[in-house]
C-alpha cells in the first residue's frame, strides 16, 4: 500500500506521483481504499502451520538526509481491522477522492492504529482459515490465514507528498 497525498492543486505537483493519490482533506479525514491481505503457502510436504500474526516496525521518522523528499507521518495513519475473517470483501469508495472508511463499510466493528500499536513485542493475532488451530500438511497451494484489512487515513494536518516507507510484517509458526 502506498500512502501518498496531494494538496488539490494538481496530482503532478509533488515528487513520486501516485497513480490514485488521496487528496488532503479540508475537513475531517480521507481514506485509502482498504487493502486486504492474507498468508498463502505453496509448500507441499510435511509442514504444519499455526499462530499467524501481524505487526509493524513502528511509525517511521524522516531520514536525514532525505533525498527522496519523504514527508512525516503527521496526520497520516494506517489502521488495521480489529477482527479478521474468511470472507473477502471488495473495497468501496470514490477513486482519487476517498475510500469508504472500513467501519462505515461494515468490514469491521472497530479498528486500531497499526503502526502505533503493534510491534515485535506486541503482535496482533490473525488466526488460521476456518478458525483451525493448525493447518497442514498441504496437498495444494492455499490461503492459510484469515483476511486482514488495512486502511490509510489522512487528516487535515497531513503534508502533501509521499510518507516515509513503513514496514509491516506477517509471521507464522511452522513445524514438520
Image (cartoon, grey):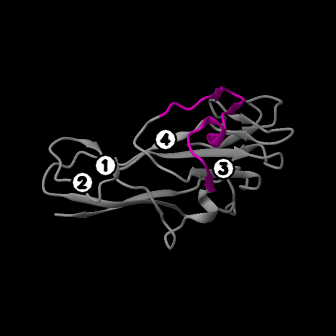
**First in residue order: circle 1 vs circle 3:** 3
Residue denoted by label 1: 144
- As helix, strand or loop, the secondary structure at mark 1 comes to loop
User: Is 20 on the left or on the right of 39, as rendered?
Assistant: right
CB-based contact (under 8 Å), mark 3 and mark 2: no
Q: Is residue 58 visible?
A: no
For label 3, the crowd category at 10 Å Cα-Cα, with few meaning under 14, some 14 to 19 and many 20 or more, is: few
CB-based contact (under 8 Å), mark 1 and mark 3: no
x then y, percent, for residue 18:
64, 34
Is-magenta flag for residue 18?
no
Quarter in which the N terminus is drawn: top right
Q: Which mark is residue 135?
A: 2
For label 4, the crowd category at 10 Å Cα-Cα, with few meaning under 14, some 14 to 19 and many 20 or more, is: some
CB-based contact (under 8 Å), mark 2 and mark 1: yes
Which residue is found at the position 59% from the left and 57% from the top?
A: 114
Q: Is residue 68 visible?
A: yes
Residue denoted by label 3: 68
Tell which of 12 and 96 is nearer to you: 96
Q: Residue furthest bottom?
A: 121
C-alpha span from label 3 to label 2? 42 Å
- As helix, strand or loop, the secondary structure at mark 2 comes to loop
For label 2, the crowd category at 10 Å Cα-Cα, with few meaning under 14, some 14 to 19 and many 20 or more, is: some
User: Is 26 on the left or on the right of 112, as rendered?
Assistant: right
Residue denoted by label 4: 36
- Residues shaded magenta: 89-112
Which residue is found at the position 81% from the left and 36% from the top?
A: 7
Q: Nearer the viewer, mark 1 or mark 3?
A: 1
- As helix, strand or loop, the secondary structure at mark 3 comes to loop
Q: Nearer the viewer, mark 3 or mark 4?
A: 4
The answer to whether 93 is drawn above or below residue 176 in the figure is above
x then y, percent, for residue 22:
70, 35
**First in residue order: circle 3 vs circle 4:** 4
Amino acid at each position: 500500500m502506498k500512502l501518498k497525498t496531494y494538496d488539490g492543486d494538481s496530482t503532478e505537483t509533488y515528487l513520486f506521483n501516485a497513480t490514485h493519490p488521496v487528496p488532503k482533506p479540508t475537513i475531517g479525514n480521507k481514506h485509502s481504499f482498504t487493502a486486504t491481505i492474507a498468508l498463502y503457502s505453496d509448500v507441499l510436504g510435511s509442514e504444519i502451520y499455526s499462530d499467524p500474526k501481524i505487526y509493524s516496525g513502528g511509525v517511521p521518522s524522516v531520514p536525514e538526509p532525505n533525498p527522496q523528499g519523504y514527508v512525516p507521518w503527521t496526520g497520516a495513519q494506517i489502521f488495521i481491522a480489529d477482527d479478521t475473517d474468511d470472507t473477502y470483501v471488495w473495497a468501496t469508495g470514490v477513486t482519487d477522492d476517498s475510500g469508504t472508511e472500513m467501519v462505515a463499510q461494515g468490514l469491521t466493528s472497530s479498528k486500531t492504529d497499526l503502526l502505533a500499536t503493534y510491534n515485535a513485542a506486541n503482535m496482533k493475532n490473525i488466526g488460521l482459515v476456518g478458525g483451525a488451530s493448525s493447518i497442514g500438511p498441504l496437498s495444494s497451494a492455499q490461503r492459510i490465514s484469515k483476511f486482514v484489512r488495512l486502511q490509510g487515513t489522512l487528516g487535515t494536518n497531513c503534508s502533501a507528498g509521499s510518507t516515509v516507507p513503513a514496514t509491516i510484517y506477517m509471521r507464522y509458526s511452522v513445524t514438520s
